[in-house]
Image: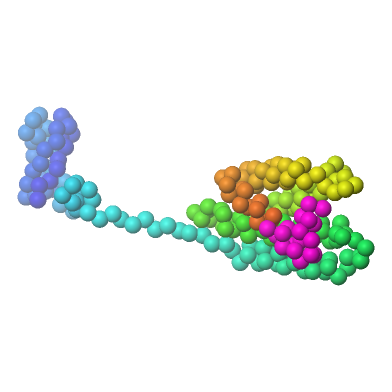
Amino acid sequence: MAIDVICTGCHKRFQVSDQFAGKKGPCPGCQTIIEIPKLEDVVVVHERERTSTGAPAKLDSIKRQRTTASKLELFAALITLTLGLTVTIVGCFVRPEDSTAPGILISALAGCFFGIGTSLLGYIVLRNPELEIVNDRKTILKAGGIGIMYAFIWRLQIIITDSTLTLEDGIILPGVIVLAIALTVTASFLSMVLLDFEFSQGLIHTSLFIGALVIYSLILGDIILILQ
């Protein structure tokens, strides 16, 4: 085996036989006395086997560490969704007979619970799987806050619809639709910024809450309750 040697005087690179390992001798170029490395000090680089095209014959696999939702996050999402359903069902029984909509407290509680639950569940599903779960409580607070923001935007739509877009003969449906689209886009943009999502992910995240509102209205027996 040949040993690669670099002269300390002229920095010329050459090879010598391994029988000279550990010995001293003159450089063939500048005659500087140099010491040949010992065999145990020689670093051998094995070239990767290649195909006829020159590409590596074998690619080393890279282990991808995927993260999953923590039990705390899943528990918080499920318990808040369950509470939202419970409040909605209770609202069916405590709603006055002469009322076509549940009380403000019931709808607000249901909206908050559904908002927190769907926000947490959506974040668990949509977040980057390469990100490590650093602080479960921080994640819950962050996603929960966005869920409450969803509930607030929903209540804001109701206030605007009742005060501006509702006439004696009914609601102005085109205006309600435009308002709903505008608030949905706004909510999606906010979740995109706060959760580091793409806009499409933010839209899906917001849509989960809208889906929860559909279930809420169907249980109460009137799909229009999403808007009123």
Asked whether residue 46 is in view, the answer is no
Q: Is residue 128 left or right of residue 185?
A: left
Place of residue 88 in the rendered image (x, y in percent of width and height, measured from the top left): 79, 65
Residue at image point 85% right, 59% down: 101
Front residue of 42 and 224? 224
Res. 81 image quadrant: bottom right
Residue at image point 19% right, 46% down: 54
Report the residue that reaches farthest toward the front. 169
- Per the rendered image, the range of residues in magenta is 211-228
Place of residue 159 in the rendered image (x, y in percent of width and height, measured from the top left): 84, 47
Front residue of 108 and 22? 108
Q: 105 above or below 153? A: below
Place of residue 185 in the rendered image (x, y in percent of width and height, measured from the top left): 67, 43
Q: Does residue 159 belong to the magenta stretch?
A: no
Front residue of 125 and 33? 125
Residue at image point 45% right, 58% down: 65
Q: Does residue 214 belong to the magenta stretch?
A: yes
Asked whether residue 126 is in view, the answer is yes
Residue at image point 16% right, 46% down: 37
The color scheme shown is: rainbow
Place of residue 218 in the rendered image (x, y in percent of width and height, measured from the top left): 75, 63
Q: How many marks are shown on the rendered structure?
A: 0
Name the magenta segment's main secondary structure.
helix
Q: Is residue 133 left or right of residue 38?
A: right
Q: Is residue 67 left or right of residue 209?
A: left
Q: Is residue 180 left or right of residue 96?
A: left
Front residue of 144 and 170? 170
